[in-house]
Amino acid sequence: MGHLSNARSIITAYRRPDPSSQPVLLHEPYRATIRRAPRKPLILLPHTLSEVTGPVYGPEDITEGDNDLTHQRGGEPLGERMILTGRVLDDNGRPVSQALLEIWQANAAGRYLHVKDQHPAPLDPNFTGAGRTLTDENGCYRFVTIKPGAYPWLNHYNAWRPAHIHFSIFGRAFATRLVTQMYFPGDPLCAIDPIFQSVRDEEAQQRLIARLDLETTQPQWALGYRFDIVLRGREATPLET
């Protein structure tokens, strides 16, 4: 495969990903896709000036403590503390700096702080379940949070979602966004979860699973997990359907 070179770096040609590395848009075991999957060919919409030039995110959009979900309500939430770190990379492995990362998740009991989540699990008054941060010059990010619990959903009989954290990654404008979900190693629910299984390629599935990181772990306080995000190419992190 050819290479494009310049004075600063060597950039490999774009490597188109295998379709099986992204979720199937119409995946019948995941019932919501039956209603919302596209039925007609996509229509190309040209970008307008506002989509290309703005909004522009910067440090002024993030306040101190936005990335620490354990200190947002004045008290400490219940559950297993975790430190979540990683890098945001392009398809050539180069860091993406100043990317806006937002996460949202259930609490340790498996319940979201959301009006539509009314299943009989307790809310935690000290946990909002949402945070955000910007990547640094090396593409690195860091969150402190609580490991979410599994929760029931109405997709099929006795359906339970594995523990997961939602990620939204913005570039410098709304037109550049990736939304995905991060799972945890060794979770048996992943094998029977239709959302996770909508990604058919096993190697791509592994890119959705964080790995235990003892270097980040703080003894007697919190376990560390690492989750790197690749924006496109053959090693791209699968999207959320």
Image: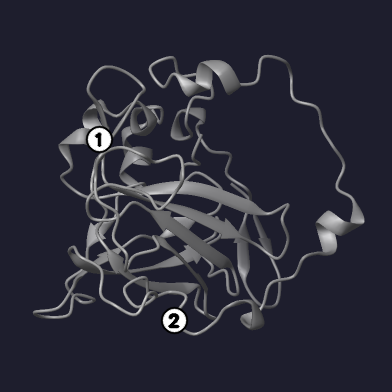
Please give the name of the residue rendered at 55% of the width and 47% of the height, measured from the top-left corner.
233
Mark 2–mark 1 Cα distance, whole angstroms, equals: 31 Å
Please tell me whether mark 2 or mark 1 is closer to you in this view: 2
Q: Quadrant of residue 30?
A: top left
Left or right, 52 with reference to 130: right
Amino acid carrying mark 1 in the image: Cys
The crowding category of the residue bearing disc 1, from other C-alpha atoms within 10 Å (few below 14, some 14 to 19, many at least 20), is many
User: Which numbered tag is attached to residue 65?
Assistant: 2
Between 21 and 67, the one nearer to me in the picture? 67
Q: Residue furthest right?
A: 49
Residue 34: where, in percent of width, then height? Answer: 52, 15
Q: Position of residue 207 (x, y in %)?
A: 36, 47
Residue 14 versus residue 46: which sits nearer the camera? 46
Q: Is residue 236 visible?
A: no
Q: The disc labelled 2 sits on which kind of residue?
A: Gly
Residue 16, compared with residue 79, is above or below; it is: above
Picture residue at 20% right of the left edge, 65% below the top = 78
Rendered residue at 77%/65% (across/down): 55
Pick whichever of labels 2 and 1 is earlier in the sequence: 2
Determine the residue located farthest toward the left in the rendered image. 220
- Which element type, helix, strand or loop, lies under badge 1? helix
Q: Is residue 114 above or below residue 61?
A: above
Percent coordinates x, y for residue 25 in the rendering: 54, 24
Q: How is the image coloured?
A: one colour
What residue is shown with label 1? Answer: 190
